[in-house]
Image: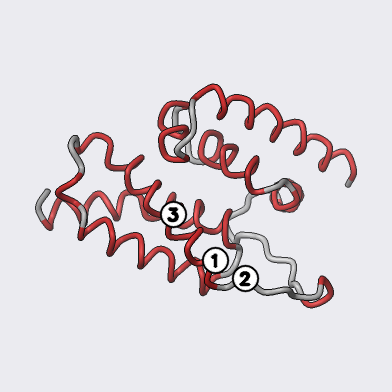
Amino acid sequence: MDKGSFIAEIEACSEMMYRVAWSILRNETDVQDALQDATLKAWEKRNRLREERYFRTWVIRILINACYDTQRKHRKVVPLEKVPLQIPASAADPELAMALEAVPEKLRLPLVLCYSEGMSYEEAAEALGIPTATLRGRLRRGKDALRKELKAE
């Protein structure tokens, strides 16, 4: 993959990458760091990508790992009173965004990838490194949790 096609692919995925990183980290500084790390790692390892049609899934997997690395670096205990309520600026429905934030990350990420980002079940499962059946189960449990959150409000 040459420099021009790499840049074009990254630009095409940039908004999706931001939303995925935000759904994991929920902190603008950490999101930007993870995006930079993921882009750099993808560039360095671009020769390992066997088929360019899987670029989106491949780069999302790299991004998710970068986000988890960022979380491990910043593990801290913060009093609940000091945690600001942050909702992505692109959220069309604030009530839905707040309910989605309350869903555990393990269930939230499949929801974001499949329903917000439009990935197929196979693409999302590969990006998360889980079997498709596991993804379907997490989607079902995630939708149930989201439904409960929306009814509670």
Residue on which the image places disc 1: 72
Q: As drawn, which residue projects farthest toward the top?
A: 133
Q: Is residue 82 left or right of residue 41?
A: right
Residue drawn at (45%, 69%), measured in percent from left and top?
32
In what element is the residue under mark 1? helix
Residue drawn at (75%, 51%), measured in percent from left and top?
102
Amino acid carrying label 3: it is Asn
Residue on which the image places disc 3: 65
Mark 2 crowd level (few <14, some 14–19, many ≥20, 10 Å Cα): few
User: Residue 92: where, in percent of width, then height?
Assistant: 63, 49
**What is the number of the mark on residue 75?**
2
Q: Earlier in the sequence, mark 3 or mark 1?
A: 3
Residue drawn at (73%, 73%), measured in percent from left and top?
77
Q: Is residue 127 left or right of residue 142?
A: left
User: Residue 1: where, in percent of width, then height?
Assistant: 12, 48
Q: Earlier in the sequence, mark 3 or mark 2?
A: 3
Q: Are marks 3 and 1 in contact (CB under 8 Å)?
A: no
Q: Is residue 43 left or right of residue 132?
A: left
In what element is the residue under mark 2? loop
How far, Cα to Cα, is label 3 from label 2?
15 Å
How far, Cα to Cα, is label 3 from label 1?
11 Å
Amino acid carrying label 1: it is Arg
In what element is the residue under mark 3? helix
User: Residue 124: where, in percent of width, then height?
Assistant: 46, 34
Residue drawn at (55%, 22%), measured in percent from left and top?
133
Mark 3 crowd level (few <14, some 14–19, many ≥20, 10 Å Cα): some
Up the image or down, 78 lies above or below 41; here it is below
